[in-house]
Image (cartoon, helix red, strand yellow):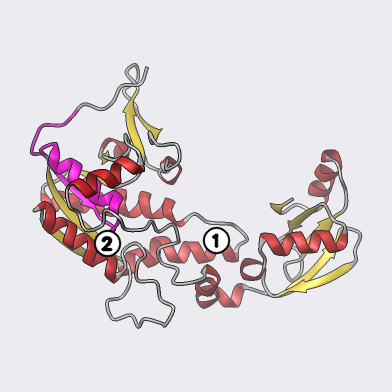
Amino acid sequence: MIAEPATPARRERVVVAMSGGVDSAAAAALLCRDGYDAVGVLLRIWPSGRPAGVNERFDSCCSPRAADDARAVAAALGIPFYTLNYEAEFDREVIRPFCDAYAAGRTPVPCLSCNARLKFGSLLDRARGWGADVVATGHYARVGRQPRTGRFLLRRGADPRKDQSYFLYGLTQDQLARARFPVGGQTKAETRRLAAALGLPVADKPESQEICFVPRDYREVVRERVGGALRPGPIRHLDGRVLGSHAGLAVGVTIDFFQKIAEASNASAVTWNPAAPRTSLILSSLPDAMSMAAMWATCPGYWIAT
């Protein structure tokens, strides 16, 4: 049996990481309703003087518009609100590793770093400056505790369609002990109804499921940061035939690209051997699992698609 963490003493101060969306707004509202002393904080991850392109996304998490929305929510709830400059830290802990991972042939999940290193990392440390020992977010997840061992457990959100526990699996025991997820026990529909009932200005705000620091296309960010590491290379069949070429695996290769290559060459699998000259793509027509395993042993690398 998993026990829910005990409710802390009333008027305990909690720092709420606010993104300008309805989930973090409802989280702050629930904390206020339950008697906590909430302090709203938004992490500014972009330079304040950053020029906006014609296709810039102003509705993303922590964008200028999001900051205005978060500030309006805090005002409606009557809680203090602060904006912290996280530009350099976000670049170092999230954007740079994101681009380096793509250049190395991996597919990163930047939210993992943001949550573990920033929201429940440095922000958690800075929360003590406001006299708070915990940080709350609008994630759909829950924290429980194992009665026998006392260990904190990360649990899925009550709404299976909105569960976000996979973005939080990197949190340590100390971080879980000081994390609060007020909306984790309810559905998205309940969150919106709560926000509407309280007259919060973001009650009907559309969801943003994009990467918050990517204005349009993640490949543009990767090219800008690590373009020198994105080398063109051949597309080879396992039998040695050269079937074509690519402009750079991290930015020019998509699932559709794989499917077209496989269909055109009658291949059943695609792998990438990063040690191969000029970052080759290797295709195979071998159909069964044993043959696929043999191909993997012959050409070790990152498995990309089937």
Q: Classify mark 1: helix, strand or loop.
A: helix
The nearer-to-camera label among 2 and 1 is 2
5 in the magenta segment? no
User: Residue beneath label 1, please?
Assistant: 101
Q: What percent of the width, then of the height, locates residue 229? A: 61, 73
> Range of the magenta residues?
7-35
Please state which of residues 24 and 131 is positioned toward the viewer in this rendering: 24
Q: Are marks 2 and 1 in contact (CB under 8 Å)?
A: no
Compared with residue 241, is residue 205 higher up or lower down, i.e. above or below?
above
298 sits to left or right of 189: right
- Whether residue 234 can be seen here: yes
Which quarter of the figure has residue 176?
A: top left
Marker disc for residue 43: 2
Residue closest to the eye, 164 or 281: 164
Mark 2 to mark 1 CA distance (whole Å):
24 Å
- Residue at 57%, 57% in the rendered image: 107
Is 98 on the left or on the right of 122, as rendered? right
Residue at 17%, 61% (x, y): give it.
72
Where is residue 248? Give x, y as percent.
67, 72
Q: Residue at x 55, y 71 (%)?
A: 219
